Image (tube, helix red, strand yellow):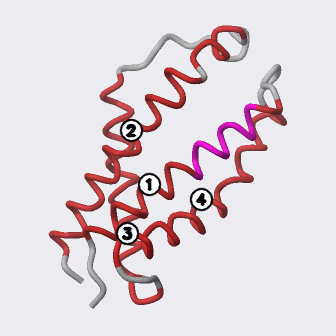
Amino acid sequence: MNWTRVLVGGIVAGIVTWVADFVMHGMLLGETYKRYDQVFSQTPANPMSFLAIAVVVGIFVAVLFAKSRASWGAGWKGGATFGLFLGLAAFFGNFYFPLVLDGFPYYLGWCWGGIGLIDAVLAGAVLGAVVPRE
């Protein structure tokens, strides 16, 4: 396993998902979050905190991808397939929020699941392009 490529891939995948989340959560769902101010009442966090977390998660996903790299097709398509399965595995975890957060709309569980799926496919495609099959 080429650790340099794994780390670079994880960092780039984290940055890509951070930008995608900014667009999807900040721009597309921003007005929705304002309508549910009783649920989303925290003070806004520093965007760099989200970047740091996205990079750390990206590195962990990159290690998982590299360890299972032989199971996935070559190039970005193989990585996107990995991301699809990873995203589907995590998709339904988003339905936990309507059960435990008072006022959390059920449809946001679907939105967050879809966003997580898109993030995982994007991260997988990046990793597939950066981490070669050995």
Under circle 3, the secondary element is helix
Residue at numbered disc 4: 87
42 to 120, vertically: above or below:
above
Residue 76's label in the rendered image is 3
* Left or right for 68, reference 103: left
The part of the chain drawn in magenta is 108-117
Question: How far is disc 1 from disc 4 in space, using C-alphas?
Answer: 10 Å
Residue at numbered disc 2: 18
Density class for disc 2 (Cα within 10 Å; few <14, some 14-19, many ≥20) is many
Quarter occupied by residue 19:
top left
Q: Amino acid at mark 3?
A: Trp
Density class for disc 4 (Cα within 10 Å; few <14, some 14-19, many ≥20) is many
Question: How far is disc 1 from disc 3 in space, using C-alphas?
Answer: 9 Å
In this view, which residue lies farthest toward the left?
A: 4
Under circle 1, the secondary element is helix
**Toward the viewer: 102 or 2?**
2
* Left or right for 38, reference 15: right
Q: Nearer the viewer, mark 2 or mark 3?
A: 3
Q: Amino acid at mark 2?
A: Trp
Q: Are marks 2 and 3 in contact (CB under 8 Å)?
A: no
Is 96 inside the magenta-drawn segment? no
Question: How far is disc 4 from disc 2 in space, using C-alphas?
Answer: 15 Å
Residue at numbered disc 1: 122
Q: Nearer the viewer, mark 1 or mark 4?
A: 1
* Left or right for 2, reference 94: left
